[in-house]
Amino acid sequence: MKRRVTLKDVADAVGVHLSTVSRALDPSSPHRVSSELAERIEQASRALGYRKSSAGYSLKTNSTRMIGVIIPDITDPAFPPIIRGIEDALARRGYVAIVANTDGDARRERDMAMMLRDRGVDGLLLASVEITDDPSREDWRDATPVVTVNRQVFGSDVPSVIADEAAGMDAIVTHLVALGHRNIAAIAGPQHLSTGVLRQRGFLAACAALGIGGSPSVAVARGYREEEGERCTETLLATAPPFTALVCANDRLAVGAITALRRRGLECPDDVAVTGFNDMIMVDRLTPPLTTVRVPKHQMGARAADMIVDLIEGKPGLERSAMLPVDLVVRGSTARVRSTVG
Amino acid sequence: MKRRVTLKDVADAVGVHLSTVSRALDPSSPHRVSSELAERIEQASRALGYRKSSAGYSLKTNSTRMIGVIIPDITDPAFPPIIRGIEDALARRGYVAIVANTDGDARRERDMAMMLRDRGVDGLLLASVEITDDPSREDWRDATPVVTVNRQVFGSDVPSVIADEAAGMDAIVTHLVALGHRNIAAIAGPQHLSTGVLRQRGFLAACAALGIGGSPSVAVARGYREEEGERCTETLLATAPPFTALVCANDRLAVGAITALRRRGLECPDDVAVTGFNDMIMVDRLTPPLTTVRVPKHQMGARAADMIVDLIEGKPGLERSAMLPVDLVVRGSTARVRSTVG
DNA sequence: TTGTAGGCGTTATCAG
DNA sequence: CTGATAACGCCTACAA
């Protein structure tokens, strides 16, 4: 088992002091050493296979170039594309992510946050926050930069990167109205999540702006799960006035909605048009393919990652937050209105 | 900005030397200090909010308690459940994962491996290997323990955790034969991946064992993607003898197959029964819901994680590899044979 | 049982 | 421009 190559090794090889090697190899200040010497050091370093010890570096600089990423569950199709965006952007800047799953459990979230702090992460990316969270509680306040992704904390000054939920909902309602729909019901997302309330607000605002009569029926899901989509659909079918279109706060709810409708003998889109939100994987392969709003998930993650690295490195002129544009993706689950459901 | 609490701080608080504190706080040798003192140290440590510096620890012990995880793409639904299993198991043992995506690019894979090595990971979990890879090349040999997950390198002694692909294929073919199918075609996975060849072998062996006549038609996919499923189906439809069932090497191929069949006016399962492999998310919501083989993805990841930690910590009696049992999940995409397709 | 001292590999400060 | 030296926080013989 061979010892690792250290600064001292290459220093000895070149015949200089290790601090000189350290300077020569520091990419941030390239000219603190004569270029001839720098060249020799460069070569020796390569020849010996020198690699900077991140442990030594971290101990000295108190920086690990690691970012903690806290998400509800990597198994939920909504998150992998975001994480991929984060990892790609971080890699470009020499950082890595450590991701932790909370399953929406506050206790687990606390434990994970502590564990990440113990590991010395330079920053935290939070995709798990609720609208009333205080992500600056746990001593994170000045200790560690925090950015929230995909969700945000209301009334907080924590930077966030989210999608333009309102614009998405507006596009959906506009699309449905253009198809002749006037009786539109909705399944809202959990109201403790910013996506849930922002999308519901956006939906209601769009309905009002487009002159959809009265107040639309809305059932509120307790989570972004297919079964909740089913349950809410049953509720609407049982208690709401007839509707020809059903706007769902996300794709998984929409999938459940279609299942429930079918179970009741209602076909989508013939009897009821259904829309989702997110454009998650596979929804283009459903029967019918889902009309939805494409959220730039990869870009969202990448933006958040860049933002937190900027924060960490004290880059000037950094924006506090970002809201990314979305696109309506029209597929087979929406069609011109034909009949009314009772 | 307050300095972090170090061993020295709590030592000063208690009035002992920091090395005593270090001993007292070491969970592995709990009795190297008088229990009365240990108690006081414990309290002071908690009161001051002491947390061991992982940088200092790593520098001294040359162990980071980090595991590198190399996968093709976290965005492919096949991987998140495995990763979740890895992360859960690692967390239980005080480790974390750093995951890197390769997109199947050998160059990227090398870069990622180097980057992980530079970071000082204690071990490597590889979900990206091909059957001819030599995962022990890059100086990893004795340097770092390696375990492959979900895939394996043929003829190598690198420990692996995989599913019982042959049993899965046997279950599928048995099921189809029981439904009366005799003309069974298949879409095989990429033959540079162990899943691809193991499943194809399993399929052919099962056909032989069950006395399916002649050699079944097999189209080979170039990747586990829906479009490849479509392409292979077109090929089979155009060139193979009529078949009433189509066995696909994984769920995404099956999804593509159903799309292609439908495009040709063939309905699943009425005209052609289709099966997948993996039981990935959402396939139970397709039309028709997919009959497939459930692979214990979470367990597979967890097992691999435990295995590599055992390797790292030199746990005795460690198995070299594991093959996990699978289950057939019968859904709507398979039905009793009705007609023959030309 | 407890204290002492050395060193893990790096960066930063200060002289020369 | 280069060398010497002092931390950074921790573990671990070894000594008391």
Image: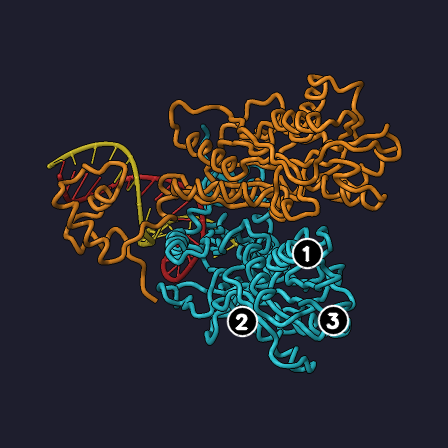
Chain colours: A orange, B cyan, C yellow, D red
Q: Is residue A126 left or right of residue B100?
A: right
Disc 2 is placed on an element classified as helix
- Residue B6 vs residue A110, the one in the foreground: A110
Picture quarter containing residue B41?
top right
Quadrant where the image shows the C terminus of chain A: top right
| Label 2 vs label 1, nearer the camera | 1
Badge 3 density bin: few <14, some 14–19, many ≥20, Cα 10 Å: some
> Which residue lies under the disc numbered 2?
B197
**Circle 2: residue type:** Val
Is residue B12 shown to the viewer in this render? no
Calculate the distance from the C-alpha at mark 2 to the C-alpha at mark 1: 31 Å
Taking the spot 73% from the left edge, 38% from the top edge, the residue there is A223
Q: Which mark is residue B265?
A: 1
Asked if both marks, 2 and 1, belong to the same chain, the answer given is yes
Quadrant where the image shows the N terminus of chain A: bottom left
Calculate the distance from the C-alpha at mark 3 to the C-alpha at mark 2: 21 Å
Residue B10 x %, y %: 50, 40
> Which residue lies under the disc numbered 3?
B175
Picture quarter containing residue A294?
top right
Please say if A246 is above or below A23. above
Calculate the distance from the C-alpha at mark 1 to the C-alpha at mark 3: 25 Å
| Label 1 vs label 3, nearer the camera | 1
Picture quarter containing residue A103?
top right
Q: Is residue C10 left or right of residue B207?
A: left
**Circle 3: residue type:** His
Residue A51 x %, y %: 31, 52
Badge 2 density bin: few <14, some 14–19, many ≥20, Cα 10 Å: some
Read off the chain for label 1.
B
- Residue A118 vs residue A333, the one in the foreground: A333
Please say if A340 is above or below A63. above
